[in-house]
Image: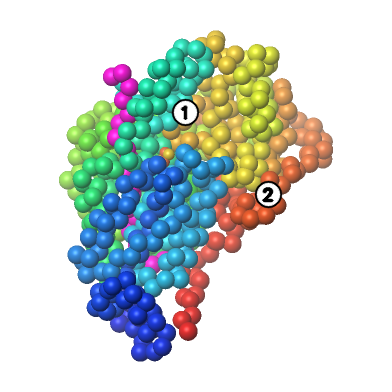
Amino acid sequence: MPSPKKPETLRSQRWYGPDDLRSFGHRSRTKQMGLHRDEFVGKPVIGIINTWNEMNTCHTHFPQRVQDVKRGVLAAGGFPVELPAMSLGEQLMKPTAMMYRNFLAMEVEELLRSYPIDGAVLMGGCDKTTPGVLMGAISMNLPCIYLPGGAMLRGHWRGEILGSGTDVWKYWDDRRSGKLDEKSWFEIEDGIARSPGTCMTMGTAATMMSMADALGMSLPGASSIPAVDSNHNRMASLSGRRAVELVWEDIKPTDILTEKAIENAIVVQMAIGGSTNGIIHLTAIARRAGIPLDLERFDKISQGIPLLANLKPSGKYVMEDFYYAGGLLALMKQLEARLHLEIPTINGKTVLENLAGAEVFNPDVIRTFDQPVMQAGGTAILRGSLAPNGAVIKPTAAEERLWKHRGPALVFKDIRDLKARVDSDDLEVTPDSVLVLQNAGPIGAPGMPEWGQLPVPKKLLDQGFRDIVCISDARMSGTSYGACVLHVSPESALGGPLALVRDGDLIELDIENRRLDLLVPEAELKTRRQQWHPPEAKASRGYAKLYIQHVTQAHEGCDFDFLQGEPGETPEPDIF
Ligand code: FES
């Protein structure tokens, strides 16, 4: 175990401790804020990474939560400082918040490095904020705890429970096919997001909060507490307290994020029917922690893990119901036989100790192995001639008749082409068609937006079809559903096989055998490859250019190549 810290060995003492001119400056300017010397010198300085702004609609409770965290830090004898970091609001950020996940990770790492910080509370929730804060903190490797923002309350409309995203897609199809009038549509708009907090379906936000919890990086069970529940305030305060203790105990992310912890998170991801985005983010998190993680590991670990959480988009309920049913700890209790139970977590206890006494209070929401929502786990990894480096699909979100499918490709060269043609009356589409979207990957889009749930063409909607096989190098929202093959790697902008597909080519999807194949002779593909030209670069300057030049592919986590490396590897800043 790491050796305990003493006041004089705190990292912040490098700034505040010495009797020299520089330290005089550090102390006097901290006192500028009206503080006494003994409020911060020799005390753990806890940076509260606050991913709040008024465009991130899911984090509107964060200003209040910061106060709760500060209360906890002060009660434990630490010195809390709020460090605002770029907030990634999934709904309003364009082209996609994913493009800025690495930006947030860089900011978090450098904030923690450049200031006199001893430990941190990492506030995240809305999709990319959770991996962003974790990735940055891992690379810095200071003692820290993750504080999940929590999900919003259930949505309501005319006696029906609405789920974020999931029900939007459903009712949007009704709206497009003329079954839902404008008044109803506006009522849904009023009722679907009723409180602070993240999407309350098992989308990417709830997935990533749950996975951070399963990794052992938050207080146990914290991820299931609704954002506006007073238990959330208490959890925030306790997280602040624990951050101070972590500094004294010198427990760092690398003490928690072991290979076994990563495997636990994968097991949980499958049992909750987690977002496919979780695969990319967990890969990036693991690699930051120095743990090589490839897609095969997801597939191997997921074998035999059924879907236990009956939550939208794969099931019936939402996160508020999950919390009242016992939350993540109750779900993990069902998985005990498949989890590594002896490993430590951020509260100083093992997984086994944290699960003691966890109970299911609603067996329809949290199922058992004997009565799962579905036998198939959450995600399948596909390989084949169309995706040599892998692709993913969420079988639980697709109609079962499409799990094995062969059909002719209908190709859209980019998102604009898709928007322009998908609803046209003369689109040559049949229920057997396989929709292919090109140039929507990490480099091609750029940023790998959530365009992967391709709309069912209106022509088919009018015939009553609600699902069709679609394939892209994009991601899809965790709240989405459909037979969507995603994350095809290598992406089409790099000349991967996806770039070579033409209208009418036969494509075969076989989820049971984990295959995705383009049934075109190799000689023909070779000719097409020779004729292929890379698309024009989407950026000539700035962050987008940096992104395009350095982002890795989906199966590698979409991190920047230059951010990979051992945790804590970058030297501490010189203080002169
Ligand atoms: Fe923030 Fe869904 S938009 S979690």
- Indicate yes or no whether the magenta region holds residue 153: yes
- Helix, strand, or loop for circle 1? loop
Q: Is residue 564 left or right of residue 47?
A: right
Q: With respect to residue 404, does 576 lie above or below?
A: below
Taking the spot 38% from the left edge, 67% from the top edge, the residue there is: 142
Residue 411 visible, this orientation: yes
Q: Nearer the viewer, residue 536 or 268?
A: 536
Marks 2 and 1, the one that precedes in the sequence: 1
Q: Position of residue 35 (x, y in %)?
A: 27, 74
What mark, if any, has residue 539 been given in the picture?
2
Is ligand 1 closer than 8 angstroms to the Cβ of mark 2? no
Q: Nearer the viewer, residue 186 or 339?
A: 186
Report ligand 1 position as a quadrant: top left
Magenta residues (range): 139-159
Q: Residues within 10 Å of mark 2 (few under 14, many from 20)?
A: some
So how many labels did they put on this image?
2
Amino acid type indicated by mark 1: Tyr
What mark, if any, has residue 50 been given in the picture?
none
Q: Position of residue 229 (x, y in %)?
A: 23, 42
Residue 260 image-quadrant placement: bottom left
Q: Is residue 56 left or right of residue 335?
A: right
Q: Which residue is mark 1?
A: 481
- Indicate yes or no whether the magenta region holds residue 458: no
Amino acid type indicated by mark 2: Ala
Q: Position of residue 180 (x, y in %)?
A: 44, 14
Q: Residues within 10 Å of mark 1 (few under 14, many from 20)?
A: many
Taking the spot 29% from the left edge, 43% from the top edge, the residue there is: 227
Taking the spot 37% from the left edge, 70% from the top edge, the residue there is: 117
Q: Position of residue 485 (x, y in %)?
A: 56, 32
Looking at the image, is mark 2 or mark 1 nearer the viewer?
2
Taking the spot 41% from the left edge, 37% from the top edge, the residue there is: 203
Q: With respect to residue 406, does 282 lie above or below?
A: below
